[in-house]
Amino acid sequence: MTKRIVGDMKSSTASRSTSARKKRRSPALPESSSPTKHGGTAKSTQSSLDEWRASHGRKRGKYNNVRTMYKGLRFDSKAELNRWQQLEQLLEVGAIRDLRHHTRFPLIVNNVKIATYECDAEYWMDADCAHVVEDTKGVRTAAYRLKEKLLKACWGIDIQEIKA
């Protein structure tokens, strides 16, 4: 008799959990969108997609950052862009050299690629010939802290953090 009650409880719990699920709603789409067989929508023209994006404003990141473009380069935040502009001024003056944007470092341990670290800026200081890898940070995530340690272990590079 106990087995029967437990079995009934499992089935009633499963039916309640499926009926209690809420469906996610997507934001309002332009009128020219048509539903597809998988529940999504297909845009009829590129212009309607551009209109929809314009009406919904700029997309912000998870940490409220605004992605921007400057001189054909992508920046993940306004703070990163501001720092890049400061570095460009230092480059013009001659305080730094070989300024690079979003350099990637593969993080390999025991011949296995674990991850890739992408810095915001990389350059050489002319005064002391020091190699500098910079990252503008607002929030130090767990993934960033792990990649920072792996970069130090694999490449022997310390990241210079700029607070946003």
Image: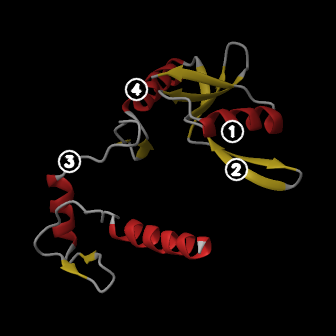
Task: Give the residue type at disc 4.
Answer: Asn
Q: Give x and y (percent) for residue 116.
A: 67, 48
Instruction: Name the residue at the bottom extreme.
Output: 37
Q: CA distance from mark 3 to mark 1?
A: 32 Å
Task: Give the residue type at disc 2.
Answer: Ala
Q: Residue at x 56, y 19 (%)?
A: 94
Q: Is residue 30 above or below residue 67?
A: below
Q: Residue at x 63, y 22 (%)?
A: 160
Q: CA distance from mark 3 to mark 4?
A: 22 Å
Q: Looking at the image, tell me whether mark 3 or mark 1 is earlier in sequence order.
A: 3
Task: Give the residue type at disc 1.
Answer: Lys
Q: Looking at the image, tell me whether mark 1 or mark 2 is earlier in sequence order.
A: 2
The residue wearing badge 4 is: 82
Proximity of marks 4 and 2: CB atoms separated by less than 8 Å: no
Q: CA distance from mark 3 to mark 2?
A: 33 Å
The residue wearing badge 1 is: 147
- For label 4, the SS is helix
Q: Residue at x 68, y 38 (%)?
A: 147
